[in-house]
């Protein structure tokens, strides 16, 4: 053998496994796992061709030198665990061998089998933390680029195959650390419910301070050519964030706060704009222009008193009022909208709508 090595012949070093020995692997999730050595082959530990150790050897030596206490990995590595136990024993490191925990696989949202990138592409959800652009040119979306908050992703992933022992779902990092017990990890695979991930993102948007959400929304406003006082953005976000699951969705639900409607939704006009709406909105614009206390409460009192005095139908007036400011039948409480827009912008939008829709 030495002669062959001296002649430059390529060789490998294998780990000799004694047959018919029960190898015990204590797994924190699965308990005592016993595998007979007869089903194990003599694994290659070193290849002279590249002068590098194989994973099995490098993994054991590295974990030992790094004083790793726990090896937590996917269940596909469970068949390799007996070999690793035998390697620790062969090196005389059995007393310092780390504890093993083999986690179940993440399963497809629909059907059977483990989760794959194709599932994400097919159902429209990311499977990578960050956007991935391989040389093939095929782009795989990432959680960050898709608008998921880091806290939401962590919380969502933590509950895939683990439970805290109670009904609590939304948890801070500190809470998860306090509640975590690896023995509560499931032995069976967890369905990757991507819709639950969206739900978590919605929850964390609600929990974040309005100022933080506003900071995240500013780039979206910039993309649409909008510059607005930060205080206004904070106010609008506070009113509308409960309607979205992603920051980018805020534009669709609250763009009217920043840009006056260029057109009016046909269906809403047909349903909400009555024969006398132009006349009523002209009168209401004059009433609003004369309001001194333009707070939400101040507006509401004056306008509702005016409606009662005139004997108008409240629903018809408020629906037409909304159409003039928003351009369609959506948005929060009407006087919240007019308060944010301010008296001048509110009256201007009403007058323009009357001109267009009369």
Image (cartoon, rainbow, N blue to C red):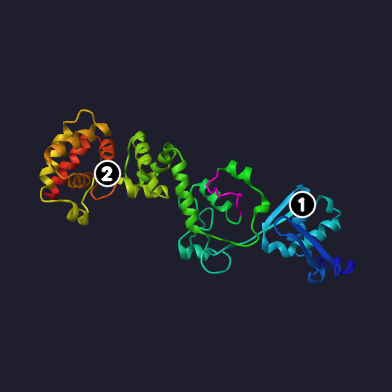
How packed mark 2 is, by other alpha carbons closer than 10 Å (few <14, some 14-19, many 20 or more), is few
Disc 2 designates what residue?
A: 259
Rendering coords of residue 158 (x, y %): 58, 51
Q: Identify the residue at horizontal 22%, vertical 37% (top origin).
A: 345
Measured Cα–Cα span from mark 2 to mark 1: 61 Å
**What's the magenta region?**
162-171
Say which quadrant the N terminus sits in. Answer: bottom right
Q: Identify the residue at horizontal 17%, vertical 33% (top origin).
A: 289
Q: Nearer the viewer, mark 2 or mark 1?
A: 1
Name the foreground residue: 320 vs 344: 320
Q: Is residue 43 magenta?
A: no
Q: Is residue 166 magenta?
A: yes
Q: Is residue 342 left or right of residue 232?
A: left
Q: Earlier in the sequence, mark 2 or mark 1?
A: 1
Disc 1 designates what residue?
A: 98
Name the foreground residue: 9 vs 122: 122
């Amino acid at each position: 053998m030495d002669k062959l090595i001296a002649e430059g012949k390529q060789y490998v070093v294998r780990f000799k496994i004694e047959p018919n020995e029960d190898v015990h692997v204590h797994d924190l999730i699965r308990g005592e796992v016993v595998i007979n050595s007869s089903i194990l082959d003599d694994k290659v530990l070193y290849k002279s061709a590249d002068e590098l150790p194989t994973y099995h050897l490098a993994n054991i030596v590295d974990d030992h030198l790094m004083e790793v206490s726990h090896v937590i990995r996917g269940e596909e590595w469970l068949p390799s665990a007996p070999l690793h136990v035998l390697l620790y024993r062969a090196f005389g490191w059995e007393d310092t061998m780390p504890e093993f925990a083999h986690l179940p696989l993440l399963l497809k949202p629909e059907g059977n089998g483990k989760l794959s990138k194709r599932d994400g592409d097919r159902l429209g959800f990311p499977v990578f933390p960050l956007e991935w652009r391989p040389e093939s040119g095929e782009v795989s979306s990432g959680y960050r680029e898709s608008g998921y908050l880091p806290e939401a992703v962590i919380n969502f992933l933590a509950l895939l195959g683990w439970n805290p022992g109670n009904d609590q779902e939304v948890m801070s990092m500190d809470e998860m650390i306090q509640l975590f017990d690896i023995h509560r990890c499931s032995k069976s695979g967890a369905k990757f419910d991507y819709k639950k991930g969206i739900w978590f993102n919605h929850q964390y948007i609600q929990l974040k301070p309005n100022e933080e959400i506003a900071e995240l929304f500013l780039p979206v406003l910039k993309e649409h050519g909008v510059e607005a006082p930060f205080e206004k953005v904070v106010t609008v976000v506070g009113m509308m964030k409960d309607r979205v699951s992603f920051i980018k969705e805020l534009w669709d639900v609250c763009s009217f706060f920043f840009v006056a409607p260029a057109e009016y939704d046909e269906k809403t006009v047909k349903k909400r704009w009555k024969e006398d709406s132009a006349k009523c909105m002209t009168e209401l614009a004059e009433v609003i222009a004369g309001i001194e206390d333009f707070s939400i409460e101040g507006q509401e009192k004056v306008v509702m008193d005016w409606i009662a005095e005139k004997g108008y139908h409240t629903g018809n007036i408020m629906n037409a009022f909304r159409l003039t400011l928003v351009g369609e039948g959506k948005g929060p409480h009407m006087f919240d909208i007019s308060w944010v827009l301010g008296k001048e912008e509110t009256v201007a939008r009403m007058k323009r709508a009357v001109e267009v829709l009369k």
